Image: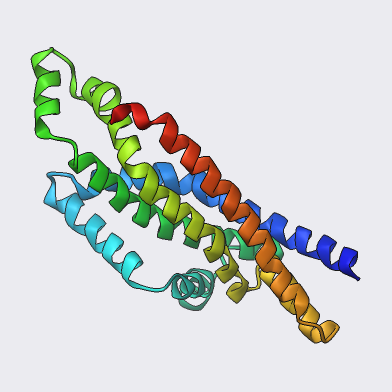
Amino acid sequence: MFQIVTLTLLEGFRHTLRLFFLTLLFSLPLGLLISFGSMSKLKALKGPVRLIIWVVRGTPLMLQLLVIYYGPGILLHNNIWGSGDNGRFIAALVAFVINYSCYFSEIYRGGIQSIPIGQYEAGEVLGMTKRQIFFKVILLQVIKRIVPPISNEIITLVKDTSLARVIAVYEIIWEGQSYIKSAGIIWPLFYTGVFYLLFSGLLTLLFRRIERKLSYFR
C-alpha cells in the first residue's frame, strides 16, 4: 500500500513541480517589466499598473483562480481555456503568473530604488548610457538585495501550488486527499507534507548558497 500511495503522490507532485517551475519561468521576467511600469514617469502607465498590483496583492489567490477559470465562460460565454485537465492547468498557470508577477514586481522595485542615486550619477559622469548603468552597475547590486525576499516568495509558491486544487488541478494534495474517500485512510494526506518539506529544504539550501556567492557586495 505504501508503494502505491508513494507512486500516486509522485504523479501529483509532478504536476505541482510543473506548475511551480512554469510560474517562475514566466513571472520572474514579467515582474521586472511590471516594476518598470510602476516606476514609470508616465502617469498614464504608472497609475493603471499600480492599481493592478494593488488589486492582485489585496485579494486572495484562491479568488483569482476561480475568477480566471470560470470568468471567461460566464461573462463571455466562451471557455477560452479549453476542456479537460490541460485547460484547468493553463488557467491555474495564468492565475499564478499574474499573482506572483505582481509580488515580484514590488520586490524588484524596492531593490532598484534602494540603490543610491549617486551610483547612477557616477555612471553618467563616466559616459555610460542608461542601459549600461543599469546592467553593469545597478543590476548585480539589486540581485544581491532582492535574493532574500525573492527566496521567501518562491518557497511560498511551493505551498501555494496546492490552491490549484480548487479548480480540480490534480496536484499532490488532491491525490493525497483522494485516499480519504477511496480507502478511508488519512495518512497519505500527511505524507504529502514530506514532499513539501524536502523540496522547500532543497530550495532553502540553494538560496543560502546563492547568498554566499553574492556576499562580495558587502
Q: Is residue 108 above or below residue 183?
A: above
Residue 171 in sight in this render = no
Residue 16, horizontal then vertical, whole percent: 64, 58
Pick whichever, 176 or 83, lies toward us. 176
Q: Is residue 37 above or below residue 77?
A: above
Q: Is residue 116 above or below residue 189?
A: above
Residue 50 in sight in this render = yes
Q: How is the image coloured?
A: rainbow
Residue 158, horizontal then vertical, whole percent: 55, 58
* Position of residue 3 in the picture relative to residue 171 (left or right): right
Residue 78, horizontal then vertical, whole percent: 54, 70
Answer with the quarter of the image where residue 172 lies: bottom right
* Position of residue 202 in the picture relative to residue 122 (left or right): right
Answer with the quarter of the image where residue 91 lies: bottom right
Residue drawn at point x = 54 percent, y = 44 percent: 205
> Dividing the image into 4 quarters, which one contains the C terminus?
top left
> Dividing the image into 4 quarters, which one contains the N terminus?
bottom right
For the view shown, which residue lies furthest in the top direction? 127
